Each structure stands twice: as structure tokens, then as C-alpha cells.
Image (cartoon, rainbow, N blue to C red):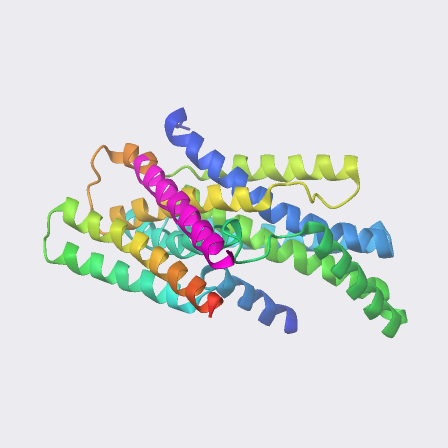
Amino acid sequence: MDLIPWNIAAPAIGAAFLASIVEVVEAFTIVLAVGTLRGWRPAAAGTVAALLCLSVIVAVLGPLLDRVPIHLLQGVVGCLLLLFGLRWLRKAILRAAGYVALHDEDAIYARELAGLQEEARRRQTAADWIAGLAAFKAVLLEGLEVVFIVIAVGAGGKTIVAASLGAMAACVLVLLIGVFMHRPLARVPENTLKFVVGVMLSSFGVFWTGEGLGVAWPGGDAAIPAVAAAFLAFSLLMIRGLRRNGRELAS
Amino acid sequence: MNTFVLVFRELVGLFVDDGSLAIAIVVVVVLTAVSSALGSPAIVTGGILFAGCLFALGENIRRTTREDRQ
């Protein structure tokens, strides 16, 4: 197996790691609520079932990626990255400027706990089953996002192993901190992570979409950091402008 | 069945949150593809893609915040 140069692997590892942390923290909050309310058996059963589903999806779809022509793969993945990355960046800018409420892991935990309690009260006999299903859905949905992120970040540039390592590191880190703290990871700077990841994924998206459409970027892969710097500067300027407008309206 | 519908909705939601932003991005990609098919220089095609994405993002945020203020 050829080793990928560090300057190519590092952005893939970094983007997959940061994006996966956001998703894994969200899944962890729900699993923690299930485990706290109904015990760890349904929480573990739901989590393991979801991980098995994810493994099957990856095992079935993974080998197909090698059969897709590289330009087509880059174009499709690039477009999806643009949709995904710009969506995150938009939300992060609006949150940073105060137009959308910040993500609150403690509030989500409390809401999930209340929802499960209510559901368990109404359907007492199936309470464990409902709790396990909640854990299953959370891990499956957030896991699918992680799988997409790994494919999107890694497939276009053949850095899928590096991206997988980044995602795995995020899972292990969140799990270790979660086991140690035993409470929702509310202090993870979710919006800052989303902002950084939005910039990174949007930059990968522009680069891969361009490559897929036959654009020869000046400097090759080195164009990615330049595009990212431009996205970052543009986003920071937007936040500054929106905050100033907000202050002027308030005064 | 509900779980599958939920998974499908979540998958779509991964890429489409504000529909107008998604449409704007698709339009930018189509314009880039047309430019590439017409044989425009790489710098022009890349410029359309990059500047188009920035414009789509900026315009969407500007519109969202304006509606929010109203």
C-alpha cells in the first residue's frame, strides 16, 4: 500500500475528525439519555444494532466506490460537499451573528429525557424497546453523516483511509470523555467546530467539483488552503457586518 | 417503516436545509459545467464556481437576516 504524503492526508484527517466530533457528540447525548433513564442494556443494544447496520452499509457500498470513474466521483462528491459544507457554514455564520440560537447539548439531553419518560409512561411494557430504538436511530442517523463525511472528504483524493482514521479518532475521543464525565458534552464548542468544518468542506467541495468538471487549479492540491482562506475571510467579514447591523438596529 | 422514512428525510436534510441555497448551488455548478463545456480557460471556469458559491452563500444569508428583521 502506498503511503499518502502528510500534506495531503492531514487536511482529510482534520476535516473528518472535526466534523465527526460534532456528529458523535450529538449521538452520545441521546445514548446517554437512554442509558440514564432505562439502563445501559437498551442503550448498548440500540447502539450495537446501529453500528452493525452501518458496517453493512459501508461493506456493501464501499467497494462500489472503486468502480466509479474518478472524475465522476470527484464531481458528485464535490457537489454534495458544497451542499453539505455551505449549509453548515450558513448556519454557523447565522449562529455566530446571533440570528439563530446556539446548539445546546444540555437542553437536547433534557428534552430527550423528558420525551423518553413520557413515551415510557404511556407504553410501560415496551419502554426498553422504545429506549433502544431511540439509541438505534440516533447512532444510525449521526453515523450515516459520519460515513458520508469520510467518503466525501476521502473519496475524491484517495484519502479515505486517512479520513476514516480521523473519524475513528473522534469516536474514541468522545467515548472516552463521555465515559469519564458521564454527562452531556455541553462544553464542546459546537458552533466553532461547525464553522471550521463548514469552511473546510466547502473548500474541498469547490476543489473537487472543479476537478470533476476538468478545472486545472493553479498549484494543484495547494489550491485547497487558498480557497479555504478565502471562505474563512468572507465568512468572518459577513459575521462582522451582521453583528454591526444588529447593534445599529438595537441602538 | 417510520424509521426508514426518518432516515431518508435526515439524509436529504444533510444537504438541503434552506431550499433556495441548495438551488443556488446547483445553478452555480450548472453554470460552471456550461463554462467548462464551452472550453473556457480553467481560471474562468474555476472563478465562476468559487465566486458563485461565495455569492450564493452571501446572498442567502443577507436575505435570511433581512426577513428575520422584518
The percent position of residue A195, horizontal first and vertical second, equals: 48, 45
Tell me if residue A214 can be seen.
no
Tell me if residue A18 can be seen.
yes
Q: Relative to A18, is A247 above or below?
A: below
Name the quarter where the N terminus of chain A is drawn. top left
Residue lying furthest front: A251
The percent position of residue B29, horizontal first and vertical second, equals: 27, 58
The percent position of residue A112, horizontal first and vertical second, equals: 75, 60
Would you say residue A250 sits in the magenta stretch?
yes
The percent position of residue A202, horizontal first and vertical second, equals: 38, 48
Q: Magenta: predominant secondary structure element?
A: helix
Is B48 situated left or right of A234 in this image? Answer: left
Residue shown at 40%/59% (left/top)?
A: B61
Find the magenta span and give its range.
Answer: A226-251
Foreground pick, A127 / A188: A188
Is A190 situated left or right of A232 in this image? Answer: right
Residue shown at 52%/46% (left/top)?
A: A194
Would you say residue B18 sits in the magenta stretch?
no
Foreground pick, B42 / A88: A88
Foreground pick, B5 / B62: B62
Q: Relative to A2, is B37 above or below?
A: below
Residue shown at 80%/63% (left/top)?
A: A114
